[in-house]
Image: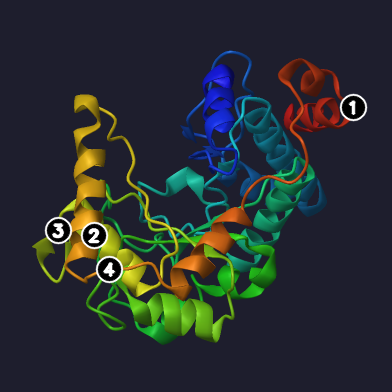
Amino acid sequence: MTALNAEIKAIRPDLLICVDHEGGRVQRFRSDGFTHLPTMQSLGELWMRDAMQATQVATAAGQVLAGELRACGVDFSFAPVLDLDHGRSTVIGTRSFHRDPRVVALLAKSLMHGMLLAGMRNCGKHFPGHGWVNADSHVEIPVDRRSLKAILADDARPYDWLGGALAAVMPAHVIYPKVDSRPAGFSPRWLREILRGRFGFDGAIFSDDLSMEAGRYIDGELLSFADAALAALGAGCDLALLCNQSIGEGRPLDEFLDGFEAAERAGRWQPSAEARASEARRRGLLPQGEPVDWQALTRSRGYLDARRLLDI
């Protein structure tokens, strides 16, 4: 993987290489020396026993997470999860720090600080909150029927509190019908009016994976990958994610790019000043400082101290 990423960067140094690597069960790299990172729920449980130790361990987890990824040429991880643990969502479950948004925000900030120590930015997800719904958005469309007031007073609080500490945000593939009929990732109300307008967020907004079942249903219609991406960008996303589509000689990716070319010819999409702002936000997510190679990393004092903190 390190060699592959180096070859990619030799061709395009500014490409942002990303992965879902949160800790717990959502950790894409587990072998070849990678540390098995704790679940975020375990950090929340530690908080209830010793809040200061929990923040130390969260910082250590972020530093190890980011340091190991960067040593292999990965630039960015979609972490941390800011969803609240309402005890309802199996797809979130142990990925959540806690039920209390204050604990979530403080532990997330510690994790993000650790990531930044290794030069990596962060991505809070899944705005405005995925923890209330039972359905798994990988296979069906979750619906959260709470009011905007209830969501803003609870699940969305970490996004407001963390403010400028968040480098990026990923919206949920969840419909909140009392706010908008579209999933949050396709909703100008959620992205432009609330996230950017009310909360003042100026970082990058990623769509969630558009290959997910809920990721392409808008107004009851299943869209193509390209049309779903266009809808996400039109709603306020800066970047659209299409993951796990390298099979079949990459045909889904070719169809995706062909769809954008067709949309541009038809006048349905064109690069604009907004697109240039999105590109600037994407570049702002590139790592800070030169990465340390694996051998040097695993001998470094900061990394070894962080690893010891994780052995609790």
Residue flagged by tag 1: what amino acid is it?
Arg
Residue at horizontal 70 percent and vertical 58 percent from the top:
109
Distance between mark 3 and mark 4 Cα atoms: 16 Å
Residue on which disc 4 sits: 269
Give whichever of 155, 282 is nearer the camera: 282
Q: Residue at x 48, y 29 (%)?
A: 28
Q: How crowded is mark 4: few (under 14 residues within 10 Å), some or many (20 or more)?
A: some
First in residue order: circle 4 vs circle 2:
2
Q: Check whether the beta carbons of the residues at disc 3 and disc 2 lie within 8 A of each other.
A: yes
| In-image side of 111 versus 8 (left or right) | right
Q: Which of marks 3 and 4 is in front?
A: 4
Between tags 3 and 1, which lies in front? 3
What residue is pinned by disc 1? Answer: 301
Pair 2/1: label in front: 2
- Closer to the chain start, of discs 1 and 4, is 4
Decide if residue 139 is in sight here: no
Whole-angstrom CA distance, mark 3 to mark 1, is: 50 Å
Which picture quadrant has residue 53? top right
Query: In the rendered structure, which amino acid carries the disc numbered 3?
Result: Leu
Q: In which quarter of the image is residue 128?
A: bottom left
